[in-house]
């Protein structure tokens, strides 16, 4: 019974599921280890993340905790997200090892630089948000408070706010990779993408409006990088197309 054709056909799927479970467990353990190592520094991590706002608060203002468990749970939650953030290269490594057997050699050679670029750009987007966007954003927001209104931001609301922006900027910085993949896969040509540039720019500003607070500074600081990163992806795709055309010409010559 165990040597039946049906069993032979199902076995590869079972092997893949076992491998997937093993890699998921390893990834969870790795995240848990980083989390436990960072947990004693949870308050310091929160202070670092909150520093762009704390530095812009008017004298006499401070952050507050409006819920009983917030002083513990908010840094705890941030530490968990930080552990996942730091574990991204390891998580992507397991994803890569899982899908590698199904790729051709040329696809593997292309996928590795794209994978490394995606991770680097995601980190770069978050760093850009923290060090460039937040200081300007919070300086603007705190300066526009009406007279008589004391700014006292809740620590949990602040965390939810910045996590949303971190994710928005991290994903936005993936635009060059996404543009390159679209061109490389043949889904759309460089010329057609370039012709649709006005719609891309409009979409960038719409994304800035939807993903950031209702102020001009943060919207512009998301929309403009999206536009610039799209142009970078378009340039890389154009160079790739030129290289492919030259390769085809050299092959076709006698």
Image: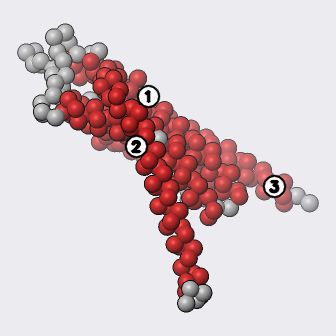
What quarter of the picture does the C terminus occupy? bottom right
Quadrant hosting residue 56: top left
SS label for mark 2? helix
Look at the numbered disc 3 and give the secondary structure of its residue.
helix
User: Which of the marked residues, 2 or 3, is nearer the chain's N terminus?
Assistant: 2
Question: Are dots 1 and 2 in contact, CB under 8 Å?
Answer: no
**Alpha carbon separation for disc pair 1 and 3:** 42 Å
Q: Are marks 1 and 3 in contact (CB under 8 Å)?
A: no
Q: CA distance from mark 2 to mark 3?
A: 53 Å
Lower sequence index among marks 1 and 2: 2
Indicate the position of residue 97 as horizontal and vertical percent values. Answer: 59, 55
Viewer-nearest residue: 170 or 210: 170
Q: Which mark is residue 128?
A: 1
What residue would you read off at disc 2? 32
Is residue 118 visible in the rendered structure shown here?
Answer: yes
Q: State how the image is colored.
A: secondary structure
If you read the primary sequence from the N terminus, does the residue marked by circle 1 or circle 3 appear first?
1
Q: Residue at x 56, y 38 (%)?
A: 232
- At which x and y percent is residue 62? 18, 18
Return the residue at label 3.
249
At x 43% / y 40%, what residue is drawn? 33
Task: Identify the image quadrant of residue 16.
Answer: bottom right
**Residue 11: image x %, image y %?**
56, 76
């Amino acid at each position: 019974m165990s040597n039946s054709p049906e069993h032979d056909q199902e076995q590869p799927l079972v092997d893949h599921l076992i491998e997937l479970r093993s890699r998921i467990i390893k990834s969870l353990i790795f995240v848990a280890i980083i989390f436990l190592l960072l947990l004693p520094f949870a308050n310091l991590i929160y202070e670092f993340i909150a520093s762009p706002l704390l530095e812009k608060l008017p004298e006499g203002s401070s952050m507050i905790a409006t819920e009983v468990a917030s002083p513990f749970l908010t840094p705890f939650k941030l530490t968990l997200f930080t552990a996942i953030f730091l574990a991204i290269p390891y998580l992507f490594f397991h994803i890569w090892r899982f899908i590698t057997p199904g790729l051709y050699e040329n696809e593997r050679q292309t996928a590795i630089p794209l994978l490394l670029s995606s991770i680097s750009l995601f980190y770069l987007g978050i760093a850009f948000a923290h060090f460039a966007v937040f200081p300007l954003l919070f300086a603007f927001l705190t300066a526009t408070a009406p007279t008589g209104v004391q700014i006292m931001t809740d620590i949990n609301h602040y965390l939810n706010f910045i996590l949303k922006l971190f994710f928005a900027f991290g994903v936005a910085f993936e635009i060059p990779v996404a543009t390159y993949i679209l061109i490389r896969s043949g889904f759309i040509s460089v010329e057609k993408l370039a012709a649709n540039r006005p719609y891309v720019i409009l979409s960038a500003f719409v994304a800035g409006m939807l993903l950031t607070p209702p102020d001009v500074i943060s919207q512009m600081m998301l929309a403009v990088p999206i536009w610039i990163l799209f142009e970078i992806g378009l340039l890389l795709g154009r160079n790739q197309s030129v290289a492919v055309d030259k390769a085809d010409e050299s092959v076709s010559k006698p």
